[in-house]
Image: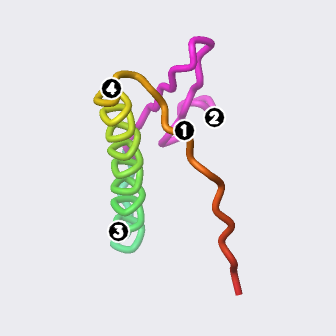
Amino acid sequence: MTAEQERMFTAERRADGSVVITFRPPRVELSGEAVSHVLASQKELLLAARSLLDSAIEWTERGGRSTRRSRVDIRVE
């Protein structure tokens, strides 16, 4: 098995600007703690995908116009 096949998540940015995310669930028996971490990471990936889709929907609803966002400095103590 190649290193590429062993990765659970892969992301590829194509020349046209599209991003392809591939998810390969593990095929091993995991401990309870490992399973909870895997499920949490899967959820985070899905939330990230939802955020990307929400942004694409908003962009479409604005007629393909982008909105300028200003940079916000966040102070960390």
Which residue appears at 46% of the width and 32% of the height?
Answer: 21
Vertical side of 16 occupied by 38: above or below: below
Q: CA distance from mark 2 to mark 3?
A: 24 Å
Q: Which mark is residue 68?
A: none
Which secondary structure, mark 4?
helix
Residue, disc 3? 36
Between discs 2 and 3, the one toward the N terminus: 2
- Does 5 lie within the magenta span? yes
User: In what quadrant of the picture does the N terminus appear?
Assistant: top right
In 3D space, how far apart are the residues under numbered discs 3 and 4 (Cα atoms)? 36 Å
Range covered by the magenta-colored residues: 1-26
Q: Which of the two discs, 4 and 1, labels the residue nearer the N terminus? A: 1
- Disc with the residue nearer the chain's start (3 vs 4): 3
What residue do we see at 54% from left, 38% from top?
Answer: 6
How packed mark 1 is, by other alpha carbons closer than 10 Å (few <14, some 14-19, many 20 or more), is few
- Compared with residue 14, is residue 75 higher up or lower down, i.e. above or below? below
For label 3, the SS is: helix
Question: How far is disc 1 from disc 2 in space, using C-alphas?
Answer: 5 Å
Residue mark closest to the camera, 1 vs 3:
3
Question: Can you say which quadrant of the picture contains the C terminus?
Answer: bottom right
- Nearer-N-terminus badge (1/3): 1
First reached walking from the N terminus: tag 2 or tag 4: 2
Q: In this figure, which residue is indicated by the disc labeled 1?
A: 6
Question: Is disc 2 surrounded by few (<14), some (14 to 19) or many (20+) residues within 10 Å?
Answer: few
Query: Which residue type carries mark 1?
Result: Glu
Identify the residue position indicated by label 4 in the image: 60
Q: Say what secondary structure mark 1 lies in.
A: helix
Q: CA distance from mark 1 to mark 3?
A: 20 Å
Badge 1 vs badge 2, beta-carbon distance below 8 Å: yes
